[in-house]
Amino acid sequence: RQLIVMGHDNATEARALVQRALGKAPAQWHDHRKGLLKALKTMAAVGALRSSKTPAQKASLASCTFNTLQATTQLAALAASINDAAKTCVNVKDEKTAKSWYGKVCAINVEQVMSSISAMAATLSLAANNCADTLMPNLDALCAGSVSG
């Protein structure tokens, strides 16, 4: 079998080309690591300049974090409620079972789905305001958060 590498049909030339490429790889990797370290140091320096936040900015950042965590929690609750509703509502087939315990449990699970959607909409709306790096409040987001929550 003949070894052809990047137009070189001579096996010796092809092997030499591969060896040169392999020889350059560690140096290139080292250069990339240096560049990454330099970028991280620059980002850290910029972050240090931003760390001088006012108490209001710190409170807004804390609210942003809590809103985001609450939205994540509501997403998990929504998934669990949908799963519960899928399992319990399958037993509700007519008016008689709708008035039984099966129907009541199904209704509770469906209501929980709606509640989770509403809470998630509210917390994401508030997060849109609290997570924005601006001096002006986002009145639309605050209004949506108040109405949906």
Image (cartoon, rainbow, N blue to C red):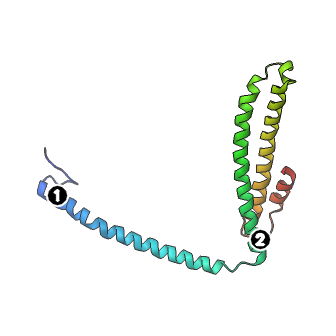
Residue at 78% of width from left, 59% of height from top?
Answer: 126
Horizontal and vertical percent position of residue 144: 83, 54
Determine which quarter of the picture holds residue 101: top right
On the rendered structure, is 122 left or right of 41? right
Determine which quarter of the picture holds residue 30: bottom left
Quarter containing the N terminus: top left
The reply to whether discs 1 and 2 touch (Cβ–Cβ < 8 Å) is: no
Question: Label 1 to label 2, Cα distance in Å?
Answer: 62 Å
Horizontal and vertical percent position of residue 53: 71, 78
Q: Helix or strand or loop: what does disc 2 sit on?
A: helix
Tell me if mark 1 has few (under 14), some (14-19) or many (20+) residues whose alpha carbon lies within 10 angstroms of its own.
some
Tell me if mark 2 has few (under 14), some (14-19) or many (20+) residues whose alpha carbon lies within 10 angstroms of its own.
few
Q: Eyeballing the image, is 2 above or below 129?
A: above
Query: What number is the disc on residue 15?
Result: 1
Horizontal and vertical percent position of residue 134: 74, 70
Query: What number is the disc on residue 59?
Result: 2
Q: How many marks?
A: 2
- Identify residue type, mark 1: Arg
Residue at 61% of width from left, 76% of height from top?
Answer: 47
119 vs 96, nearest the viewer: 96
Q: Eyeballing the image, is 146 above or below 2?
A: below
On the rendered structure, is 66 left or right of 95? left
- Identify residue type, mark 2: Ala
